[in-house]
Image (cartoon, helix red, strand yellow):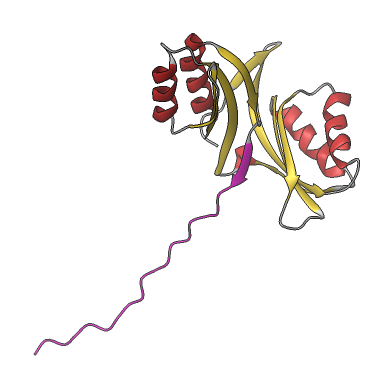
Amino acid sequence: MGRERRKREKGRAFVEHVISVTLENKSGALSRVAGLFSGRGFNIESLSVAPTLDPSVSMMTVVTNGDERIIEQILKQLNKIIDVIKVVDLNESDAVSRESALIKVHARAEDRAEALRIADIFRANVIDSSPTSYTIEVTGDVQKIHAIIQLLQPLGIKEIVRTGRIAIAREPVRTVAAQSRPLAKAN
């Protein structure tokens, strides 16, 4: 999953984990998963959930922090929830993750060109414009989102809405052995 973010709490090293949960798309399933975290005092840094191609199944991405013992407990408890089909700690595999943000910035006449320049550098899109503001849409890894926010802050951020992370495991790369061909006979 790239760089691990670490925190220390009461002398223990807490590592950020991205957990993928496949669950039945039915009433109460999300609240049961969220309740597991709150009932045991675990924090959810971000949570994203939506139906899959099969409308009866949803995919949830949960970002949380914990030491090895806490993460193991979270995974075991998630697997006990009746609506849960599959749980994967994406820190244990090669995965790709993204986050999106909508950032509304002040667009004073003297700052408009700078706001557009920053959006262009980050391959972000201006999705709304008014005489006093721009709304910028950006997608990328967590570091990219943090970086654009830092550059836009001097212009004056009016509002930010973030999706939270979504993630998916990469498929393993399969190497195919070259087929041997008979050598041509020299004349």
Q: Is residue 4 left or right of residue 113?
A: right
- Compared with 182, 141 (above or below) is above
The C terminus - image quarter: bottom left
Towards the viewer: 116 or 27: 116
What predominant SS class does the magenta segment belong to?
Answer: loop
- Compared with 24, 38 (above or below) is above
Tell me the residue at 74%/28% (across/down).
Answer: 69
**Which residues fall within the magenta stretch?**
166-187
Q: Is-magenta flag for residue 17? A: no
As drawn, the residue found furthest toward the left would be 187
Image x and y of residue 91, in percent: 61, 37
The N terminus - image quarter: top right
Q: Is residue 183 left or right of residue 7?
A: left
Snapshot quadrant of residue 70 = top right
- Compared with 62, 134 (above or below) is above
Q: Is-magenta flag for residue 171? A: yes
Tell me the residue at 77%/48% (across/down).
Answer: 58
Image x and y of residue 87, in percent: 74, 45
Tell me the residue at 42%/67% (across/down).
Answer: 176
Snapshot quadrant of residue 180 = bottom left
As drawn, the residue found furthest toward the bottom would be 187
Image x and y of residue 28, in percent: 91, 40
Towards the viewer: 46 or 182: 46
Snapshot quadrant of residue 129 = top right
In this figure, what is the number of numbered marks? 0
Image x and y of residue 73, in percent: 79, 33
Towards the viewer: 32 or 40: 32
- Compared with 179, 133 (above or below) is above
